[in-house]
């Protein structure tokens, strides 16, 4: 009996560790720094150019630049591009502007005058501009980790709950005979799953905080260069995103336990 | 005298379609001690399971404490189970002390600690275990385990006790002890239905005998 309970506990630890792996992979999607290797060009090639904003441009200034570009004849499309999409670690964004091909030169000339505006850093043709992103290999590894984490969590939870219900079978039978409502058993089983998710979230927060400290204070700066951990806002946002994800995965694990508990109860009838 | 159990035209088929119970009619009044006897596979345990609401009825009517089991919702069946004390065949209490067994059940049913302790003490006293409240499971005799089982039923003030083969693992001395316990419970106007293969050593006037053979009541 004690061995069965210990076995259930160790399987639960494995299950929670897998939720952690899932959340870690999920977080890494957003916290790995994009690189400019083998990247695709941004923009529409011929017939378009890019208006770079200065790093200190305010929202109002960016709005004013947009309005100025919009007022130029033959501009058919304007897209805002974040700095990181242009170059890793770049803060300043830019407007990608497409004009009617026949009027490109005149539009280009008019837009060039925008370089004199305080909020505009430069006006370029987007020939050498590349979109930065996380390398495909890293993305594939993270995706595999994510899928394995979720599947592994559900499988491990099933084993853990089966052992747990087996270890407490006498108690469950007694409750069943006593006429205790289903919720007496099902709610705690579900809560165990959710608590596993919450525990995994807390560990992710702890690990992310430690990594962030290492990234900021690290002597060689390698961690800061290969991740976006130095960006406090991004780290907080990613950790907040982990909350619902972790709770959903924990709830799925709990639901697996509830299903087993219902089946066990049906067997004793 | 009020009726606690009223069974009419009860039929039951097993998974293979074989008849387990055939046109059972049975009435048990308050304060009665009824022994259902019969050979193996006579249908005794199925009948007990039906009365305890643990087996879903197929055909016929079962009224327990005035409630029709066949038409009862799941929730109401659980509520009724709290008023029916059912000790199935082969039941073993938890490997804890008698007091802990009862406390576990009562706390799970929502009783506060003080009320649970009070009810546990009363029930254990009724079955003669008040001096062994904290005895370790290993030190208890098989008859004591049956007493713990009965105390588990008594602690929720049931209207009906259903005991399935409680003498199965007992020696003659243990059987006599449990029979004495049943006699005491009967004097307290508690209704008990007991399924057993062999009749225990009790005075014939103290119980009513129902004989079940091949799913039919042959004498009552």
Image (spheres, coloured by chain):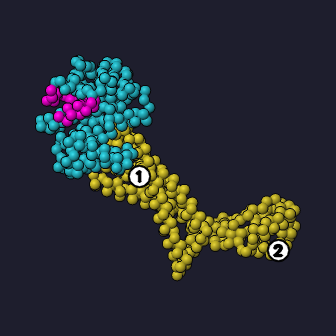
In this view, the residue in front, B93 or B6, is B6
Q: Is residue B14 visible?
A: no
Q: Are marks 1 and 2 in contact (CB under 8 Å)?
A: no
Residue at 26 percent of width and 48 percent of height: B99
Q: Which residues are magenta?
A: B180-203
Q: Is residue B69 visible?
A: yes
Q: Position of residue B124 (x, y in %)?
A: 24, 43
Q: Chain of mark 2?
A: A
Disc 2 residue crowd, few under 14, some 14–19, many 20+, Cα 10 Å:
some
Q: Is residue B188 magenta?
A: yes
Q: Position of residue A49 (x, y in %)?
A: 78, 67
Q: Is residue A68 magenta?
A: no
In this view, the residue in front, A157 or B210, is B210
- Chain A: drawing colour: yellow
Q: Which residue is mark 1?
A: A157
Rounded to the nearest whole Å, what is the CA distance between mark 1 and mark 2? 60 Å
């Amino acid at each position: 009996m004690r061995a069965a309970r210990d076995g259930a506990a160790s399987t639960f630890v494995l299950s929670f560790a897998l939720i952690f792996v899932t959340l870690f992979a999920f977080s890494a999607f957003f916290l790995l720094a994009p690189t400019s290797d083998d990247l695709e060009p941004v923009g529409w090639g011929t017939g378009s150019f890019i208006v770079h904003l200065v790093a200190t441009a305010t929202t109002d200034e960016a709005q004013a630049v947009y309005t100025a570009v919009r007022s130029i004849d033959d501009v058919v499309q304007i897209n805002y591009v974040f700095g990181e999409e242009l170059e890793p670690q770049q803060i300043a964004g830019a407007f990608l502007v497409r004009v009617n091909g026949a009027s490109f030169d005149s539009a280009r000339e008019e837009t060039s005058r925008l370089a004199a505006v305080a909020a505009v850093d430069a006006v370029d043709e987007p020939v050498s501009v590349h979109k930065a992103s996380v390398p495909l290999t890293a993305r594939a590894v993270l995706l595999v980790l994510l899928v394995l984490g979720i599947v592994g969590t559900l499988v491990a939870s099933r084993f853990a709950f089966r052992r747990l219900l087996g270890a407490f079978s006498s108690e469950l039978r007694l409750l069943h005979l006593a006429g205790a409502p289903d919720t007496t058993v099902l709610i705690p089983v579900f809560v165990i799953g959710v608590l596993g998710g919450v525990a995994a979230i807390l560990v992710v927060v702890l690990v992310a905080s430690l990594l962030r400290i290492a990234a900021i204070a690290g002597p060689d700066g390698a961690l800061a260069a290969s991740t976006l951990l130095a960006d406090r806002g991004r780290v907080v946002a990613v950790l907040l995103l982990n909350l619902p994800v972790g709770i959903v995965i924990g709830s799925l694990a709990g639901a697996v336990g509830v299903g087993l508990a219902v089946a066990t109860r049906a067997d004793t009838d | 005298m009020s009726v606690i159990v009223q069974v009419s035209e009860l039929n039951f088929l097993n998974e293979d379609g074989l008849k387990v119970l055939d046109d059972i009619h049975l009435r048990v009044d308050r304060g009665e001690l009824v022994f259902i006897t019969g050979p193996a596979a006579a249908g005794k345990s199925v009948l007990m399971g039906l009365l305890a609401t643990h087996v879903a009825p197929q055909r016929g009517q079962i009224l327990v404490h005035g409630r029709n089991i066949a038409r009862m919702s799941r929730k109401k069946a659980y509520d009724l189970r709290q008023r029916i004390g059912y000790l199935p065949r082969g039941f073993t209490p938890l490997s804890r002390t008698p007091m802990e067994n009862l406390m576990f059940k009562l706390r799970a049913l929502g009783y506060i600690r003080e009320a649970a302790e009070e009810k546990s003490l009363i029930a254990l006293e009724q079955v003669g275990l008040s001096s062994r409240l904290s005895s370790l499971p290993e030190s208890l005799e098989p008859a004591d385990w049956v007493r713990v089982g009965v105390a588990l039923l008594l602690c929720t003030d049931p209207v009906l006790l259903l005991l399935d083969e409680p003498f199965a693992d007992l020696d003659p001395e243990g059987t006599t002890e449990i029979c004495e316990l049943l006699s005491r419970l009967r004097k307290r106007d508690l209704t008990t239905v007991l399924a057993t293969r062999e009749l225990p050593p009790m005075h014939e006037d103290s119980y009513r005998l129902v004989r079940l053979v091949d799913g039919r009541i042959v004498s009552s």
